[in-house]
């Protein structure tokens, strides 16, 4: 039995702008995981089981049964297909196997929390198949294969969740230009795309701030990131407002990454507030639906205690983050209480650090 886990993620800054090539985001990987276990197949078929929607276990017959795959298996199916293509390019057919998936990135009833389950399931699948199919891929190649699988399902996603699930910890991430990557894929195939230049892509791990601790609040309302992203993409992209947002978000993310590298608390707090204000201004002009009452209450409550906070990810619900000074247990507990009073649930999450370089 082979087992691989991949962590979920939270956006710290750079949401939306990171979907445009050359624009960055800061993300963190969190200590909640999707785990994929692989065992021998009893019947010569590749099968997948997942407790995707709470208690309901779904089953599909992997790559041998493309047409009958239930829609929720889109990322799983895509990862299987991409890994199989690399196996075939290396010579030899992918061996059948029995895969089972468990996740703690949803709440007990299977409700989405916005912690990047699609990225985590795709990376965990690629990691397990890297062993089962003996692909011999290093970390950067596994990210690329997971990114190709993600792009096949959602061509507009930045893959920030895929990068966080692959590298762990705190990250400064820039998405590849997906149009250029599609051209590489069309000319070189999947295996050939794993080492070819991907324009725009950059990833850099950052040291964790030593005097600030991430506190995560959940609004209780799941949001569809894809629907919000569609509204962002429908905005006037040539307009001055859009250009300003992209440039200012990118500059904020660069300064934030530098402040994190220098462990400079005040500068980190300042950039978190700038990132929040940029998203609020974008929402006011483009009407995306990022702001909700609960998210505004979440960050305003934190700010009333002097704690920098913002929505995390696409907004519209899901989670927000606050950076609480360490060594002030009273402040953290005050924030938890005030959030609880406002209907915001504190999620007890820690940062996931990946060991080793490869
Ligand atoms: N345990 C799982 N087994 C199989 N597929 C999963 C599993 N968990 C998530 N997925 C896939 O990921 C999709 C959810 O992606 P979605 O982007 O809506 O949520 P998320 O990634 O958790 O949240 P967010 O994008 O806000 O961070 C599911 O529809 C399914 O295709
Ligand atoms: C809006 C966006 O920048 C972030 C989405 O974040 P989340 O999946 O809602 O946590 C989209 C993306 O990066 O693909």
Image (tube, helix red, strand yellow):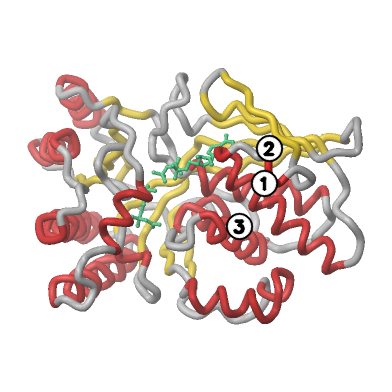
Figure check: 348 above or below 259:
above
CA separation in Å, label 3 and label 1: 10 Å
Ligand 1 has an atom within 8 Å of the beta carbon of the residue at disc 1: no
Q: Residues within 10 Å of mark 1 (few under 14, many from 20)?
A: many
Quadrant location of the C terminus in the rendered image: bottom right
Question: Which corner quadrant of the image does residue 273 belong to?
Answer: bottom left
Whether residue 235 can be seen here: yes
Question: Is label 3 in a helix, a strand or a loop?
Answer: helix
Figure check: 242 above or below 290:
below
Question: Is label 2 in a helix, a strand or a loop?
Answer: strand
Q: Position of residue 218 (x, y in %)?
A: 30, 32
Sequence-first disc among 3 and 1:
1
Circle 2 is placed at which residue position? 36
Q: Position of residue 283 (x, y in %)?
A: 15, 55
Q: Residue at x 13, y 71 (%)?
A: 241
CA separation in Å, label 2 and label 3: 16 Å
Sequence-first disc among 1 and 2:
2
Q: Are marks 3 and 1 in contact (CB under 8 Å)?
A: yes
The front one of 353 and 119 is 119
Q: Position of residue 91 (x, y in %)?
A: 90, 66
Q: Residues within 10 Å of mark 3 (few under 14, many from 20)?
A: many
The front one of 97 and 37 is 97
Horizontal side of residue 267 vs 314, given as left or right: left
Circle 1 is placed at which residue position? 125
Question: Which corner quadrant of the image does residue 187 belong to?
Answer: bottom right
Sequence-first disc among 2 and 3:
2
Q: Position of residue 157 (x, y in %)?
A: 44, 59
Circle 3 is placed at which residue position? 149
């Amino acid at each position: 039995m082979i087992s691989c886990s991949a962590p979920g993620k939270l956006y710290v800054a750079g949401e939306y702008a990171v979907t445009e090539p050359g624009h960055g985001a800061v993300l963190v990987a969190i200590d909640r995981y999707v785990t994929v276990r692989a065992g021998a197949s009893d019947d010569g078929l590749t099968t997948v089981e997942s407790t995707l929607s709470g208690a309901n276990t779904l089953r599909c017959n992997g790559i041998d049964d493309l047409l009958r795959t239930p829609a929720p298996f889109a990322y799983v199916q895509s990862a299987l297909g991409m890994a199989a293509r690399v196996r075939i390019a290396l010579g030899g057919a992918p061996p059948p196997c029995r895969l089972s998936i468990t996740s703690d990135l949803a709440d007990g009833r299977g409700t989405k929390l916005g912690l990047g389950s699609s990225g985590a399931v795709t990376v965990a699948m690629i990691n397990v198949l890297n062993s089962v199919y003996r692909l011999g891929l290093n970390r950067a190649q596994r990210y690329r294969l997971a990114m190709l699988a993600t792009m096949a399902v959602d061509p507009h996603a930045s893959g920030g969740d895929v990068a966080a699930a692959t590298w762990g910890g705190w990250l400064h991430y820039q998405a590849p230009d997906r149009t250029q990557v599609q051209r590489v894929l069309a000319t070189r195939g999947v295996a050939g795309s794993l080492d070819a230049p991907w324009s725009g892509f950059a990833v850099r791990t950052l040291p964790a701030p030593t005097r600030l601790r991430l506190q995560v609040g959940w609004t209780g309302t799941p949001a569809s990131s894809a629907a919000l992203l569609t509204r962002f993409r429908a905005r006037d992209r040539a307009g001055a407002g859009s250009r300003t947002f992209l440039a200012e978000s990118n500059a904020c993310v660069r300064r934030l990454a530098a402040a994190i590298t220098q462990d400079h608390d005040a500068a980190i707090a300042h950039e978190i507030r700038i990132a929040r204000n940029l998203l609020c201004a974008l929402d006011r002009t483009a009407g995306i639906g990022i702001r909700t009452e609960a998210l505004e209450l979440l960050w305003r409550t934190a700010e009333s205690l002097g704690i920098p906070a913002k929505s995390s990810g696409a907004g519209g619900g899901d989670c927000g983050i606050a950076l609480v000074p360490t060594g002030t247990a009273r402040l953290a507990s005050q924030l938890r209480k005030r959030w609880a009073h406002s209907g915001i649930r504190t999620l007890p999450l820690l940062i996931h650090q990946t060991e080793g370089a490869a």
